[in-house]
Amino acid sequence: MAGSKLVLEGRVSIKAFILGLSVLLIPLIRTWFGHLDWVFDYLTETPGKVVICLHVAVVNGLLLLIYRGPIYKVAVRACFLGVTFGCGLMISFSETTWTHFGWYMCSLSFFHYSEYLVTAIINPRSLSLDSFLLNHSVEYTLAAISSWLEFTVEKLTVPELKQLSWISMAGLVMVLCGEALRKAAMLTAGSNFNHIVQNEKAQSHVLVTSGVYAYFRHPSYVGWFYWSIGTQVLLCNPVCILGYTIASWRFFRERIEEEELSLIHFFAEDYVEYKRKVPTGLPFISGIRVN
């Protein structure tokens, strides 16, 4: 019964994400009667903001009619991420100097939604609202807000810095590769993957050493590390590139040491041997020391 409920949550999230993505119908309908260069006005000018707000209100009302309780909480989050992804696409394909921020919006919203969806597929028992990682930590939220502020301030004061397309393209490649590696790690680990470090071994826990785990001991962290820094390279945010690199490196160093304590406790010599052969994948992070 619990399993079917969790599967339902995953299905609801897909429908809600697509419903949020329907915000793209606004420019598509208008394009039939005009040109694409007006699209960005829907996100900057007052009439456009009103249309977007009305669309979101109607969609949210529809979700309230269809879903209740915990299921609604899943739906409204997935829908919000769908709207954000759709607005990011609008900006990305419009004739504006904010194109790279549109890429960022798509990257950020897809990352958070796919975290939930992949968890629903591989480990529905651990599925919860926290699987969206939207409330990851206060530090994570402050880091995101800081990047938005830096991008806006520098765009207004040093606009030429935000027009270095080759740097933004390099950031986009980092984001795509980091995202692909993290999701490959999650899918390879299957039910062994959990967003929360486990201190007790479940009967289903096995030591995964195949696929991307044959190259990195912590491929999901490697992917997340480079995805995180890539978002700031994409935005050409020099201050946040440095800040994200330092903060992410410290976070994953501590996280890996904590996790490896549990893994050595779970798998003993098998993990120690695996640890000797395969690196963490993160620069200057070797994990917990073993005598």
Image (tube, rainbow, N blue to C red):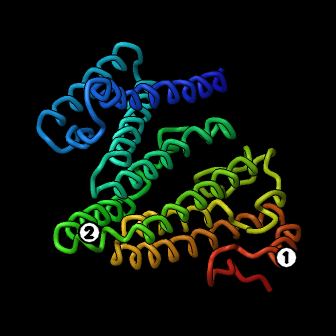
Q: What residue type is labelled 1?
A: Lys
Residue at 57% x, 30% y is 10
Instruction: Find residue 83 and report its horizontal and vertical position in percent.
Output: 36, 36
Residue at 40% x, 19% y is 68
Residue at 61% x, 36% y is 120
Vertical relation: 148 (above or below) 72 = below
Residue at 48% x, 66% y is 171
Q: Is mark 2 on a helix, strand or loop?
A: helix
Closest to the observer, 83 or 30: 30
Disc 1 packing (10 Å; few <14; some 14–19; many ≥20): few
Q: In which quarter of the image is residue 93?
A: top left
Residue extending furthest top? 65
Q: In which quarter of the image is the N terminus?
A: top right
Vertical relation: 209 (above or below) 115 = below
Instruction: Find residue 238 and report its horizontal and vertical position in percent.
Output: 35, 77
Q: Is residue 171 left or right of residue 181?
A: left
Q: Quadrant of the C terminus?
A: bottom right
Q: Is residue 177 left or right of residue 14?
A: right
Vertical relation: 33 (above or below) 116 = above
Which comes sooner in the sequence, label 2 or label 1? 2
Instruction: Find residue 278 and report its horizontal and vertical position in percent.
Output: 80, 74
Disc 2 packing (10 Å; few <14; some 14–19; many ≥20): some
Q: What residue type is labelled 2?
A: Glu
Q: What element carries label 1?
A: helix
Q: Which mark identifies residue 84?
A: none
Q: Is residue 269 left or right of residue 110?
A: right
Q: Which mark identifies residue 150?
A: 2
**Residue corresponding to mark 1:** 277
